[in-house]
Image (cartoon, rainbow, N blue to C red):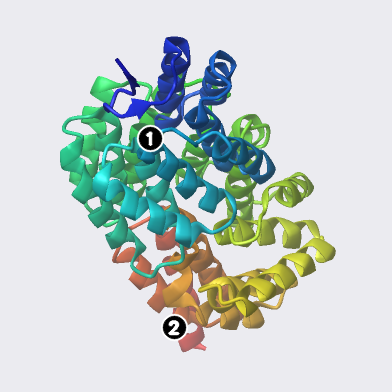
Amino acid sequence: MSLTDRYGLTLSTASAAAARHYQDGMDRLLSYGFGADQAFAAAVAADEGFALAHAGAALFSLFQGDGASAKASIDRARGLVGGVTRREQQHVAALAAIAGGEAARGLGLIEEHVTEFPRDALLVNQAGSTIGLGGRADREALRVGFVEALAPAYGDDWWCLSALGFAYHEVGRYDESRRLSERSLAQYQGNANASHNLAHVCYETVDNEGGITMLSDWLGGYDRRAPFHCHLAWHLALFELQCGRPDRALAIYERDIAPSSNPRLAMIDGSAVLWRFGLYDCQKGPLPWRRLADLATRVTRPGFIFGDVHAALAYASAGDEGALSGLIGGLEALHAKGHPIAGTVALPLVRGVQAYVAGDYGGALALLESVDSEIHRVGGSHAQWELFEETMVVCQLRLGRLEEATGLLRRRLARRATPQDLMWLRRAEIARDASERR
């Protein structure tokens, strides 16, 4: 009798121990729990010829931003797929494309694959992430359609409930996202995907104190070494910033983000926190940008645009003109090869960041405004890419373009009434009234 994973899919190994460790790695990866890499390593140790165990290790490395390790693991998997099931061969081929920097081709392979194997959860999970970072203008709706179409194959499975919950909160279906995420946590309390969804729902509904309470409680039982601890700490820091407590936010950065075991998220989330300190006028001294710039040199890779735009924040703020020039050159090269957003969206954002740090607020605003309607295409959630909208607001205020600032703020407030946007709006209206009285 062949061994299977908990979704009923055949695992081509004769070792029950290897299959057990692989399933453990799957669950830890799908829940962003600690130890997925160790579980996949244990599966390899039990059966070195088990191709999917090597592929699982590659997936973990991809999430960590370790492209070299991901490629090494997937290359080992590719060398072992002869004679295994077609499902496993296709699984490895799709991941090989993604690890090789061909995200669009990899996503296409996954989409074709899951029409026949909808319960290949690791690939469905990876596709959701790839859709989110692939530069598509309709990515949120595309992700909802993708997960909804596959959800019937999973029933009340805890992972699928949280995957659907994530897709829903990104399109404003907050009540549904909360309901599904709470059902997921009731089954699997350690599912960081589900607690992440609840953090987003609190953020988008301006329940900052509720978000702090929920995350503080949940993080108490979540291993600090887990790959998503850093990102959930980032959400906690955002809540504290919105509540006007920058000292707490900086303490979270120092304790939970900067020393994270996930260098990619440490760079992205760390840069997004420190940049807001400047925007929100709560910076009391030099900020630790050099550490993040050094991290950026380790984890950026061609084509990962979401990482590139955050690396630009770190390079520019640390004054690392050489690294910033190299980043711009890499984006220009990708644009020349036909990348859909490297030149048209990412480059204006990166150059806008460069201008902003140099104090050229007019130049920064012109660059950022040129891609205003396209910023979401760099990937990530609304909570992440809105950083560039906020930078536009600050540029408008510093330039005295009060009507423009008021218009952008009212557009943002129509989505949700954040304390920071309300404060900026009051500042703009007071300045405008004073100008009219003169």
Label 2 amino acid? Glu
Image-based side of 104 in relation to 281, left or right: left
Front in this rendered view, residue 170 or 99:
99
Q: Is residue 106 above or below residue 209?
A: below
Figure quadrant of residue 310: bottom right
Residue at figure coordinates x 52%, y 19% from the top left: 43
301 left or right, relative to 433: right
Query: Which of pointers 1 and 2 lies earlier in the amino acid sequence?
Result: 1
Q: How many other residues sit within 10 Å of disc 2, few (<14), some (14-19) or many (≥20)? A: some
Circle 1 or circle 2, nearest the eye: 1
Q: Is residue 222 left or right of residue 302?
A: left
Locate residue 23: give its quadrant: top left
Instruction: Locate the N terminus by quadrant.
Output: top left
Across and down, in percent, residue 156 comes to: 17, 30
Q: CA distance from mark 1 to mark 2?
A: 62 Å
Q: Position of residue 317 (x, y in %)?
A: 74, 59
Nearer to me, 171 or 90: 90
On the image, numbered disc 2 is attached to which residue?
A: 403
**Name of the residue lying farthest toward the top:** 17
Taking depth in this image into account, of 248 and 199 the one nearest to the observer is: 199
Give coordinates of residue 318: x percent, y percent.
Answer: 78, 56
Where is residue 51 shown, x and y percent of the image? 51, 31
Q: Which residue is mark 1?
A: 85
